Image (cartoon, rainbow, N blue to C red):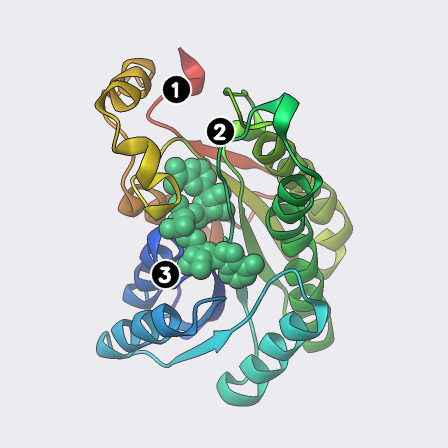
Amino acid sequence: MRLADRVAIVTGAGRGIGRAIALGYAREGAHVVIADMDGTTAERTAAEVRALGRRALSVTVDVTQRAQVETVVERTVQELGGVDLLVANAGVAGRYDFLEMTDEVWNRTLAVNLTGVFLCGQAVARQMVRAGRGGAIVNIASQRAEIADRGQAHYCASKGGVRVLTKAMAVDLAPYGIRVNAIGPATVRTDINRERLSAPSEVERMVQRIPLGRLGEPEDIVGPAIFLASDEARFVTGHCLFADGGWLAG
Ligand SMILES: NC(=O)c1ccc[n+]([C@@H]2O[C@H](COP(=O)([O-])OP(=O)(O)OC[C@H]3O[C@@H](n4cnc5c(N)ncnc54)[C@H](O)[C@@H]3O)[C@@H](O)[C@H]2O)c1
């Protein structure tokens, strides 16, 4: 019970990595707010959290919209009594040739993946500062914050931004006892890359790059997310923990 009675907001937790983290936090004793653009999947995850005996709230939100993000924090405080943890996980991807990339793709990717992390982090940190008891923020970056791949200029730029934003937030929020870290997963089997993973040659190409010899599963990201949110990481801030099967090492 490393997160006993903490209140966590997890964005994009209707499915995939965010859902796995929300359930992992609940197993460690946390109450969880499931904040996702898809209200139906958000409520489904919330029901799974309640089935584990914790309190849960599902909120439909677009993390690019400041007013909606602030409402999530307000409702969390009203209904669950405060906020101790944030996992800024909501994200979008897609592959587009650099020469063909539209403003729309670029702007939307940066808005969700980078501005969304800023807006959620700022709204939650303001509440944590008001409450005066510190907290922990985990931003979901990517190995693409470190190395590029074809057709991912928009995504790499957004995740590189998240990695450095994490350091900047860590420095600015340290005086308030708020730790800010990131996780950089390699390819994880979720809907975000379902199309790509349906091509066996693509899967083979990626697996060959991973020393541990397999793609990631959402559950592989849960342990790092619990660690970074827990008191076990009390002297860790501004760090990006790459959960990548060794991809970046080889
Ligand atoms: N799956 C991977 O290979 C991988 C690798 C590295 C990093 N990541 C990152 O992990 C995070 C989660 O990805 P996933 O693989 O679980 O993807 P996913 O597509 O399965 O889940 C993403 C969730 O975010 C929600 N979402 C999207 N835009 C939103 C918005 N504007 N506001 C609120 N919610 C929104 C979606 O509704 C969905 O529930 C993303 O930030 C992604 O970039 C994923």
What label does residue 72 carry, if any? none
Q: Residue at x 28, y 13 (%)?
A: 208
Residue 47 x %, y %: 28, 77
Residue 2's label in the rendered image is 3
Kind of residue at badge 3: Arg
Circle 1 — which element?
helix
- Residue 168 visible in the current orientation: yes
The residue lying at 40 percent from left, 64 percent from top is: 3
Quadrant holding the N terminus = bottom left
Say which label, 3 or 1, has the lower sequence index.
Answer: 3
Which numbered circle lies on residue 247?
1
Spatial separation of the CA atoms under disc 1 and disc 2: 8 Å
> Looking at the rendering, which quadrant does residue 103 occupy?
top right
SS for tag 2? Answer: helix
Residue type marked 2:
Gln
Label 2 Cα crowd, 10 Å radius (few <14 / some 14-19 / many 20+) = many
Q: Position of residue 155 (x, y in %)?
A: 57, 35
Instruction: Give the secondary structure at mark 3.
Output: loop
Vertical order, 167 against 227 (above or below): above
Label 1 or label 2, whichever comes before in sequence order: 2
- At label 1, the amino acid type is Trp
Label 2 sits on residue: 143
Residue 237 left/right relative to 66: left
User: In 3D space, how far apart are the residues under numbered discs 3 and 1 (Cα atoms)?
Assistant: 29 Å
